[in-house]
Image: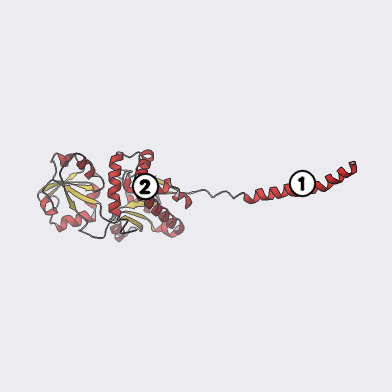
């Protein structure tokens, strides 16, 4: 009997070793190699955190950037920053700029347009009741930001209407609120159609909207761009950033309330939830996703 047990032990031992080794091999085979670390890149925004940049926030939150191997630092605009220089110098990898990006390129600055999101020009003039056209502003006061004064669309619109700052139109520094218009201290003010009208509507203030988009049709806003150097050295990374951003915009437009809550919780904007939801609706119209899928 003892001899029989010894024989069984001798026979079983190799079997146990085989199963043990097989288990080790199986365990090793299902261990996936560690994912490479995400590549850090930066996006310089053209203004403060709000819904006009919602697609980029959504791309980060939903993991679309991470799926492309990117860890994106989204930077809010700071007063005095030269947005184009920020990217062409390499301090930021990507940037957002207005329609004037085209003219920056024409002036020889090494920028590359990657994507355009707003298909309609968002800047308008909000005017006192009865002032319906640019012609009606002759001899009046226009409150406008420094960026607005430099806009090629604004300059072309004023020129076409025969308005010359300092002669038949007084330009005033922008206070970035609608108070001067409400108090009739100005005849008109520059505004983003997705922002300032909300505050006038909420107070039941009457006003006119003077469109500028007909001056240079075809120009939009929220243009994603990079530098020639970045595009040449990192073509795959550039392509991956655009693809993730596009997915983010689709998600943001399909889930506006969720995206507004994300902006409020993570990016701490100055605007209220109600104002951001108003902006979300306006952004959808500016992007015209049904016409430009």
**Which residue is nearer to you in this view: 196 or 74?**
196
- Label 2 residue SS: loop
Picture quarter with the C terminus: bottom left
Q: Residues within 10 Å of mark 2 (few under 14, many from 20)?
A: few
**CA distance separating discs 1 and 2:** 56 Å
Query: Which residue, given by chain and number where applicable, does mark 1 sit on?
Result: 16
Q: Position of residue 152 (x, y in %)?
A: 23, 56
Specify the farthest residue to the left. Answer: 139
- SS for dot 1: helix
Q: Residues within 10 Å of mark 1 (few under 14, many from 20)?
A: few
Q: Which mark is residue 255?
A: 2
Q: Quadrant of residue 287?
A: bottom left
Q: Which quadrant is home to the N terminus? A: top right
Residue 62 screen position, x and y as percent: 43, 47
**Residue found at x 22% / y 45%:** 197
Q: Quadrant of residue 266?
A: top left
Extreme residue toward the front, this view: 1
Front in this rendered view, residue 281 or 54? 281
**Residue occupying the point 14% across, 53% down:** 134
Q: Position of residue 163 (x, y in %)?
A: 13, 54
Q: Residue at x 21, y 50 (%)?
A: 124
Q: Give x and y (percent) for residue 161.
A: 13, 56
Q: How many circles with numbers are drawn on the protein?
A: 2
CB atoms of marks 1 and 2 within 8 Å: no
Q: Is residue 140 visible?
A: yes
Residue 175 seen from this side: no
N-term mark: 1 or 2: 1
């Amino acid at each position: 009997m003892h001899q029989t047990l010894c024989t069984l032990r001798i026979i079983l031992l190799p079997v146990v070793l085989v199963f043990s080794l097989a288990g080790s091999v199986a365990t090793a085979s299902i261990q996936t190699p560690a994912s490479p670390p995400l590549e850090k890149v930066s996006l310089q925004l053209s203004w403060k955190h709000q819904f006009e940049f919602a697609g980029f926030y959504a791309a980060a939150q939903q993991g679309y950037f991470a799926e492309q191997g990117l860890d994106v630092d989204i930077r809010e605009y700071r007063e005095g920053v030269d947005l184009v220089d920020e990217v062409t110098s390499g301090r930021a990898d990507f940037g957002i700029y207005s329609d004037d990006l085209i003219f920056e390129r024409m002036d020889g600055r090494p920028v590359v347009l990657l994507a355009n999101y707003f298909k309609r020009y968002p800047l308008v003039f909000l005017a006192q009741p009865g002032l319906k056209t640019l012609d009606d502003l002759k001899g009046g006061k226009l409150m406008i930001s420094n960026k607005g004064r430099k806009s090629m669309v604004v300059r072309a619109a004023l020129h076409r209407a025969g308005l010359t700052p300092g002669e038949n139109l007084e330009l005033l520094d922008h206070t970035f609120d609608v108070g001067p218009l409400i108090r009739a201290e100005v005849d008109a003010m520059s505004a983003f159609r997705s922002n300032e009208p909300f505050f006038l509507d909420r107070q039941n203030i009457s006003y006119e909207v003077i469109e500028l988009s007909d001056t240079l049709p075809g120009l939009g806003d929220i243009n994603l761009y990079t530098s020639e150097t970045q595009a040449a050295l990192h073509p795959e990374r550039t392509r991956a950033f655009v693809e993730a951003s596009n997915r983010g915009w689709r998600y943001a437009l399909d889930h506006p309330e969720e995206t507004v809550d994300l902006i409020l919780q993570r990016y701490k904007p100055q605007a209220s939830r109600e104002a951001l939801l108003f902006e979300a609706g306006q952004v959808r119209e500016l992007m015209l996703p049904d016409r430009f899928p």
